[in-house]
Image (cartoon, coloured by chain):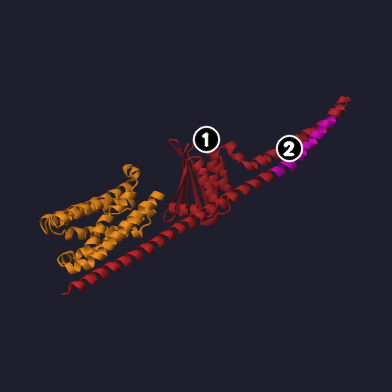
Amino acid sequence: MVNFIFYMTLGSSGIPLFFINYKRFINFRTNRFYSFFVMLLMARFLTDLSVFVLEKTIHNSLPTFHFSGPVQFILILELFYLVGRFKLKKSFFIVIALVFSALDLFITSNLFDSNVLSALYHNLAIIFIGFRIFLSHEGTKFERLILESITIYYAVLIFYIYFFDETTYSKELMDYIMVFVCSVILVLNGIFTYSLCLNHKN
Amino acid sequence: MLEPQELGFFIVLFMLLTLGMGSVMIMLSRKNRKIKILSDQLVKSIEDKNKIEKLGIAISSKEEERSTIARVLHDDIGAILSLAQKNLSNMKENSVQGDRNFEAISLSKEYVSESIESLRNITKGLIPHYLLKFGLVKALEKMTQQKTDSFIDSFNFKSNIPDNLLLSDLVMTQYFYIASELITNLLKHSGPTSIEMTLTFDSDHLTMKITHNGIALSQSDFELLASDSDSIGLGNILYRLSLINGEIIYKKFEKNGTMEINAKV
């Protein structure tokens, strides 16, 4: 049952892709936010696809997150910086993210183990930047819907990441939490699909 | 040490709490945003209303001025010219019969002279006649002295404008009226005991500086007053400055204040 929910959640990241306006996506100069958002959706879909493939082949999908984590983080940063104005430079966050990724790959962990350190950093940074957006009045309805959803999603998942190792090595705990985490991911994909429809309508 | 199920329960509980808090924050931020949009709209509508009111006052005062001019033209000049016309018609009829009435001719001349005089009086009220006749320096000196004579202890006027400098009517008129408005405002609101006015011309720039020892305004004070208050006078100053691409700079010092008007002429 949990496996079914897990694979269904992975598949759900492909749903928003059906609602993309590819003409707008290609027109990068005039629709920067939309284009980066579509890139993020694609990165999420590719991540889930590779998780599925690796789970089926080597029964370990953790290598995917070492690479998809920083990529998604950079794309999300781009989205935030397109809407809001922040004192700290984007490159500051990116450099730290790359340092943590390297640490996770070579020192604190390895390719086949979890990247908790960098994932925690990604979540904390996104929560920090995201809540600044909450306080500001910048962005359109479409932009704010996406950024608010991403912030809440990363805020909710921070506890799951913090206890990731305990969760991974205990099947009982994994089954317990996975249902909730999958529900959150499903809701996020639902919001992304809705925002694309909303934007398409506008 | 927590059992896996307990740990799971706490993790999910924390997640739910975060989700709840996040949702509340989103709702509050959206509400806050709506309030900001509404307050911006309200401020804009008030500003628009003020602008319309100011425009209305300006238009009605202009209408009033026009009706006054029309009334004076009709009652004074119109009446006299009608008499002159009637007199001339009588003379024409009499001259056909061979009569030459010198008294009627001199009366007509008187009527025409009178109407010219009335016309002069009206134009004097409309434009600063003295300004066009004697130039900006003399007109400013006369106007400011007349205004300040009984209100302050000392008034000084200095100018380095060369006699052969020809200023356009537009520049002269705007400088004259701006100075007049500034002096009136000074006497009304600042209570100075001494005013010094200098008019200088340097590399195509005409600068008029008024230094006084009354209550002074800084540039930001002036901008705030000009944007907030319903004062037509301040609005007129800015309008007149825009006509000559000029600027006004207010400075506030410990013991005095200055107002400097500068424009390229």
Q: Quadrant of residue B230?
A: bottom right
| Residue closest to the far right | B97
Provide the secondary structure element on which disc 1 rests.
loop
Q: Quadrant of residue B151?
A: bottom right
Magenta-tinted stretch:
B70-91
Chain orange in the figure, letter: A
Indicate the chain on which mark 1 is placed: B
Does residue A6 show up magenta in the picture?
Answer: no
Tell me how far mark 1 sits from mark 2, CA to CA: 31 Å
Give residue B70's position: percent from left, percent from top.
Answer: 70, 43
Q: Is residue A179 left or right of residue A99?
A: right
Q: Are marks 1 and 2 in contact (CB under 8 Å)?
A: no
Q: Main secondary structure of the magenta part?
A: helix
- Residue that label 1 marks: B167
Chain red in the figure, letter: B
- Residue that label 2 marks: B115
User: What's the residue type where badge 1 is placed?
Assistant: Leu
Circle 1 packing at 10 Å, graded few (<14), some (14-19), many (20+), is few
Q: Residue at x 17, y 74 (%)?
A: B3
